[in-house]
Image (spheres, helix red, strand yellow):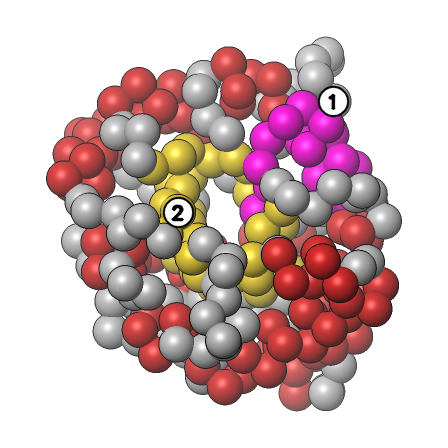
Amino acid sequence: MMSSRKFFVGGNWKMNGDKKSVGELITSLNRAKVPPNTEVVCAPPSIYLDFVCQKLDQKICVAAQNCYKVAKGAFTGEISPAMIKDCGATWVILGHSERRYVFGESDELIGQKVAHALAEGLGVIACIGEKLDEREAGITEKVVFDQTKAIADNLKDWSKVVLAYEPIWAIGTGKIATPQQAQEVHEKLQSWLKTHVSEPVSRAIRIVYGGSVTGANCKELASQADVDGFLVGGASLKPEFLDIIQAKK
Ligand code: 13P
């Protein structure tokens, strides 16, 4: 059966680019054709959010890569969902493994951020994923279920959430999860959501894969029944991102 879920392609630029290269990326994205059954969201560094929102064609939405859990105040260096919206962006990535493991963000903090971002009306790309030693120890399911639970506990409405499964061993390593490995975890996440949240949520939510997605491997990944899109890092800065947008055409 064809999935009714709209294919979702996110580009996480991480801490890359400068005004010149971001301008060039925007020019190339503005020329891209977005298939009608695909949604594309790009996440520039926060300092370029305003610039990107002003220049990028509206067929592509804009996400921040992170935000804080309250609207304003004495939190040096942070940005809020209110500011993200003020710049014209409509999404935020939360719980990325680099936030979890480079910056020490806990499940609890990520849950609070998710709750606040949704309350402010942003869409949330919520990231989960196991480390290599966790996969080797056979606890992948436990890790991703626990991370999903910490997010689920903070939510009532899932309609603006995309769940991004990003096995950490596959991020920026060129070592991609096989389409079967991705499908297996996505299917298990879906059935966890069916049991612990609801059947309609499990059917409607998009679970996207992230970790060394490229123009060359995206089609086979996209052909898996429960892979509803991608969160792309490195390749989202390259011309091949335009091929990834077409993966489910
Ligand atoms: P890479 O595509 O560079 O492996 O990064 C994946 C990622 O972390 C996207 O959020």
Assign the magenta stretch its main secondary structure. Answer: helix
Q: Is residue 21 left or right of residue 124?
A: left
Residue 145 lies left or right of residue 101; in this view the side is right
Crowd around label 2: few <14 · some 14–19 · many ≥20 (10 Å)? some
Residue 164, percent across and down?
56, 58
Sequence order check, earlier mark of 2 and 1:
2
Q: Position of residue 231 (x, y in %)?
A: 45, 56
Question: In this view of the protein, which residue sits in the foreground, 184 or 144?
Answer: 184
Residue on which disc 2 sits: 39
Label 1 sits on residue: 70
| Relative height, residue 2 to residue 231 (above, below) | below
Residue 92 point in image, percent of width and height: 55, 37
Magenta residue check for 111: yes
* Residue 136 appears in the figure: yes
Check disc 1 and report its element: helix, strand or loop. Answer: loop
Q: Secondary structure at mark 2?
A: strand
- Kindly indicate the quadrant of the structure image that contains residue 116: top right
The residue drawn where x is 33% and y is 70% is: 218
Magenta extent:
109-125
Identify the residue at horizontal 39%, vertical 35% (top origin): 61
Residue 132 rendering spot, x and y as whole percentages: 60, 78
What residue occupies the far front of the structure in this picture? 1
Q: Residue at x 69, y 13 (%)?
A: 72
